[in-house]
Image (cartoon, grey):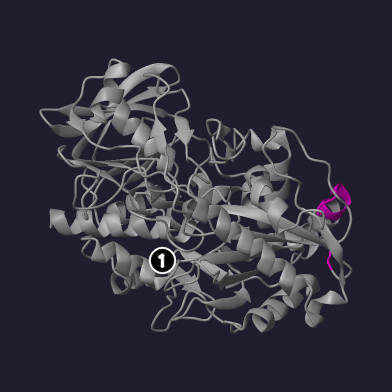
């Protein structure tokens, strides 16, 4: 990426707020099309070994002092249906946003998800439409076909160092559940067991920042880091720029054409409300003048999982300081260690009894013991050195909905994040069935000989006990969406062209616009939303 000019640009055709998964894509594509663009990011540089090396996600998330350098440190409000737990919400405080701190799992979701969006009135968001965008984004290791792309800014590879324990689970699950082993779950059919695809290549994390900013490096894009956007400047019903806090000084960056909020599921609704766009009664509580009375912050939802850990003789533990030292030594000499890959290895998209037309359970395989019962406490968990395999039984279509609200009018204060986790009984039922099916798989002939028994939650928790224990163990995959819902009805914040209702020159482009969550990890869809936004804006301006 070209270095930013010493003098910061104070006006451009487009001002994009947030250099995360979607923001990097929309900013780079608009600049590539010939427009001047300023991209504003509250976090700092991503030029850190911790960020660039895929396998460093372990210490990045587990060591509090390290995590604080790249994460905003958000927590939910006490979750009423989850024992009043405050559940962490990791969000990247760095160029690339959460694509710089995530597990690098490249999952588009089920094609039916996008057709459902279109059926709700979101024209242009069906499976066929978004497939063309994904093909533009990807540089897939198998090359291009009817579904996959080659030559795009994000390199996508299959995990190349799958442990025997994870591979064995993949095969055992396919046989036990009667589903196929799928070569490409991002292709024609998602359902089945597979090897994870990762946004990783050559031992490097392919975050949105690497793909769109460092590699594309459009000359007419200026990136400003470590600046906090306080609000959108709205004059006469039109967004004309943003007010930023830069080294304690407030200044305005003007947008000649449009302002695009890509600050994420928490940041975008927070900024809208600080700017007078949101629920009128709530804004009034904080003395904010109402510009547009919209349901900003509603429809908040997320993926949840329960970890089930088994002792496995053929697992390879890689979580100790010694293992990291060995991995680093190899990376510095010849490369190709476990640090060159995501920590997640195999995956399945399968059905519980509550599934309708698509799989409703995602199984992530992780080749070590997960902290029990959860990772709520902001302390470093003791590493369990035993050989183990953890399966994350993941609810991918939650029914529960929550809200995001302002804690006050201070733009530097964290918002109030209430997912209302597990409010709907069906969510607990899907998770319970996910645990039950995982236990069944681990008793099968293909894996039983290597399995030394269930470590967590443990055999003491039968189905009856688990119904309540899920409240203590269920935790987030950090896939919050929906707080600036796209649609054509009164529940919508943005229309299908991502324009904020009632305010000209203002769009939102990130995971917050999803009407409903997709069936899989949300990074790839967030990048796609950025690409879509750029295409919509460019077409409208032509």
Residue 52 picture location, percent across and down: 62, 52
Whether residue 473 appears in magenta in the rendering, the answer is no
Give the camera-side residue of 152 and 163. 163
Residue 161 visible in the current orientation: no
Residue 304 picture location, percent across and down: 56, 52
- Give the left or right position of residue 96, taking residue 22 as reference: right
Residue 498 picture location, percent across and down: 24, 50
* Image: magenta residue range: 315-324
Residue 145 visible in the current orientation: yes
For image coordinates 83% across by 67% down, the residue present is 315
Quadrant of the rendered structure where residue 263 is?
A: top left
Q: Residues within 10 Å of mark 1 (few under 14, many from 20)?
A: many
Label 1 element class: helix
Q: Which residue is mark 1?
A: 137
Q: Is residue 232 above or below residue 439?
A: above
Q: Is residue 207 above or below residue 341?
A: above
Location of the C terminus by quadrant is bottom left
- Give the left or right position of residue 124, taking residue 424 as reference: left
For image coordinates 19% across by 45% down, the residue present is 490
For image coordinates 52% across by 67% down, the residue present is 155
């Amino acid at each position: 990426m070209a270095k930013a000019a010493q003098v910061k640009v104070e006006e451009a055709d487009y001002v994009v707020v947030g250099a995360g998964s979607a923001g990097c894509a929309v900013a780079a594509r608009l600049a590539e099309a010939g427009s001047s663009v300023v991209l504003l990011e509250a976090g700092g540089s991503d030029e850190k070994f911790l960020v660039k090396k895929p396998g460093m996600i372990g210490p990045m998330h587990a060591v509090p002092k390290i995590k604080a350098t790249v994460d905003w440190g958000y927590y939910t409000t006490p979750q009423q249906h989850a024992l009043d737990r405050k559940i962490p919400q990791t969000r990247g405080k760095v160029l690339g946003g959460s694509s710089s701190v995530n597990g690098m799992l490249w999952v588009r979701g089920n094609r039916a998800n996008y057709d459902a969006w279109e059926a709700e009135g979101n024209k242009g968001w069906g499976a066929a439409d978004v497939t063309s965008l994904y093909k533009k984004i990807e540089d897939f290791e198998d090359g291009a076909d009817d579904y996959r792309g080659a030559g795009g800014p994000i390199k996508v590879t299959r995990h190349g160092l799958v442990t025997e324990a994870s591979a064995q689970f993949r095969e055992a699950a396919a046989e036990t559940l009667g589903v196929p082993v799928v070569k490409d779950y991002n292709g024609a059919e998602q359902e089945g067991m597979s090897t994870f695809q990762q946004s990783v290549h050559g031992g490097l994390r392919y975050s949105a920042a690497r793909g769109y900013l460092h590699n594309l490096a459009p000359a007419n894009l200026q990136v400003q880091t470590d600046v906090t956007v306080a609000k959108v400047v709205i004059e006469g019903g039109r967004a004309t720029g943003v007010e930023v806090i830069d080294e304690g000084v407030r200044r305005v960056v003007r947008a000649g054409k449009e302002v695009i909020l890509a600050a994420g599921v928490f940041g975008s609704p927070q900024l809208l409300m600080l700017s007078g766009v949101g629920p009128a009664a709530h804004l009034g509580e904080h003395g904010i003048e109402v510009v547009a009375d919209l349901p900003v912050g509603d429809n908040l939802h997320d993926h949840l999982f329960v970890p089930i850990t088994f002792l496995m003789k053929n697992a390879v533990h890689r979580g100790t300081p010694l293992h990291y030292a060995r991995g680093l030594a190899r990376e510095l000499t010849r490369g190709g260690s476990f640090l060159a890959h995501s920590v997640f290895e195999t995956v399945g998209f399968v059905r519980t009894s509550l599934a309708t037309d698509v799989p409703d359970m995602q199984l992530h395989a992780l080749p070590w013991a997960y902290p029990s019962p959860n990772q709520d406490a902001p302390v470093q968990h003791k590493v369990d050195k035993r050989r183990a395999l953890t399966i994350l039984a993941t609810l991918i279509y939650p029914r529960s909905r929550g809200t995001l609200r302002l804690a006050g009018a201070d733009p530097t204060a964290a918002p109030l994040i209430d997912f209302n986790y597990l409010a709907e009984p069906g969510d607990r039922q899907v998770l319970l069935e996910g645990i039950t099916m995982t236990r069944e798989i681990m008793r099968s002939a293909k894996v039983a000989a290597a399995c030394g028994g269930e470590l967590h939650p443990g055999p003491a928790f039968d189905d009856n006990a688990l119904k309540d224990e899920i409240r203590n163990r269920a935790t987030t995959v950090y896939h919050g969406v929906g707080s600036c819902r796209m649609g054509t009805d009164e529940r919508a914040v943005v229309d299908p062209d991502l324009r904020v209702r009632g305010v000209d020159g203002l769009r939102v482009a990130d995971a917050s616009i999803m009407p409903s969550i997709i069936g899989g990890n949300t990074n790839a869809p967030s990048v796609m939303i950025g690409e879509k936004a750029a295409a919509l804006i460019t077409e409208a301006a032509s």
